[in-house]
Image: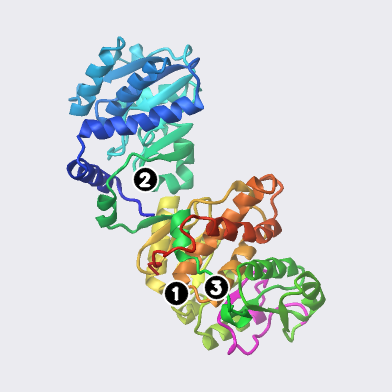
Amino acid sequence: MKFFSTSQIAEIDQYTIENEPITAIGLMERASEQLEIWIETHFNTHYQIAVFAGPGNNGGDALAVSRMLIEKNFMVDVYIPDSGKKFSDSFKINLDRLKKLTEVTTINWSNRELLPELAEYDLIIDGLFGSGLSRPLSDFPAQLVKHLNSSGLPIVSIDIPSGLMGEDNTGNDHEAIIHATYTLTFELPKLSFFFRENERFTGKWEILPIGLHPAGIAQTETLWHYSDLRSMVSILKPRKKFSHKGTYGHALLVVGSLGKMGAAILSAKGCLRSGVGLLTIHIPKSGNQIVQCAVPEAMVSMDKSENLISGIPNLTSYKAIGIGPGIGKANQTAIALELLLENYHGPLVMDADALNLLSENIEMIELLPEKSILSPHPLEFERLAGHAESDFERLKLALNFAKTHRIILILKGTYTAIALPDGNCWFNITGNPGMASGGSGDVLTGVLTGLLAQGYTPEEAAILGVYLHSLSADLSISDLGISEESLLAGDIADGLGLAFGRLKRDDDFGKAKKKSQF
């Protein structure tokens, strides 16, 4: 799924108006109907609602949904701050429609003493400023936003919290942005929704479909994408009836050290559950019995060292290699990593201590095979590429890093970002806070390696692997009843079958599928 900058969304709105065709006020009515349905579903008519409508189209949406809620017997008071700015045409039409139903309260934009008392209300609807905002709020608008935030009431923001910009909020005044409980965005998310520092503003955000023209979306180019079920189904390769274990590749995982054989086991389970045909695990000698008992489906290659990785096996039979979980940062292990990079030029996944060794021996980065997959968490990425003040700046750094070094960078987090060497970026929207526990990244390394060994392109493996890994965590909670607090990395590995099954149950699976773009 593609999504766009706020200026591009405005262009797609206009394309929809011209080519559906539909009037601007008709499109606003359609959007407001979706807002009304959502609010009616989540709140009952006993709620006393205060709606704040600014002078632009965001305010027009607020006026339209106010009218619809009043018609559904909700108790609604509408406040229109007088900014001295010209009302948009759609705003004026909706104001006239609303006035036929109820008297509208107006507060003066320049008089702070007329800020409304909010104690009698149960809910605020924020329609002050939309996604076209290009500078921080100041003066009375900022004061009004702070007043709404201080009420302690739940706030529903229309399309985007007032004061928040759609992309870069570097330099924005964070005290002058609505702290929404829910953000109901139209058709497509905004880039700023994917950044940790903006969660306190967006709250829980949801996408409301408003029927933007598919041709307008299709012909608008963008570097931004997010993974959804349909796009993942287009990547997934169905298994053939007459296939055998050799059909699905032989993977190698270089993992583990004394005291960290659990990482080896978790990555191995993730790899096996990804559908790989054969798996060999290269581990220190001391881990042999542990791994043979815990993962009998895998073969073991033992390092000459008792307790750490000090060398590599013959690499000729492997379709993909993953290295890093639990290997530590000993000098012998750094030498083994360099030896692997010098002798292997196929699909490669690097995570955990392999990334830490790379950051300490940065000259090795020139040895990485093109489109190698690196999967750091933010601190590991900082060691590799430098410090960033915000998630937005970190994403820019990641995109530049991927492009410069011709690698795929999976920046792990709540909305894991996958930076591709061509400049495209995919955000993953599956997953939950239960994944914030040791070992979940080890499972992901195994999944990625297994998909590469099966013949998925590095781009496909990265995007699909991250999605399946996080979807497994979601389904472990929803289908198996595991709580977020109790979710273990092993549960994610074990739940991968549920995740694959969810993709295969999609109506389009098994039919003539759209070819993957990778």
In this image, 183 relative to 468: left or right? left
How crowded pointer 3 is (Cα within 10 Å; few <14, some 14-19, many 20+) is rated as many
Mark 3 or mark 2: name the one nearer the start of the chain. Answer: 2
On screen, residue 377 versus residue 370, left or right, reads: right
Residue on which the image places disc 3: 349
Q: Of the residues under marks 1 and 2, which one precedes in the sequence?
A: 2
Which image quadrant for residue 144?
top left
Quadrant housing the C terminus: bottom left
Instruction: Examine the structure image and report whether residue 261 is included in the region drawn in magenta.
Output: no
Q: Against 147, is 197 above or below?
A: below
* 269 lies left or right of 425: right
Q: Quadrant of the N terminus?
A: bottom left
- The CA distance from mark 1 to mark 3 is 9 Å
Q: Nearer the viewer, mark 1 or mark 2?
A: 2
| Residue 497, percent from left and from top | 63, 61
What is the magenta range?
306-333
Q: Identify the residue at the far top of this view.
A: 103
Q: Residue at x 36, y 54 (%)?
A: 2
Residue highlighted by disc 1? 371
Q: Residue at x 28, y 37 (%)?
A: 133
> 88 left or right of 228?
left
For mark 2, what is the residue? 188
Which one is in front, 203 or 277?
Answer: 277
- Look at the numbered disc 3 and give the secondary structure of its residue: strand
| Front tag of 3 and 2 | 2
Total labels: the figure holds 3
Which is the main secondary structure of the residues drawn in magenta? Answer: loop
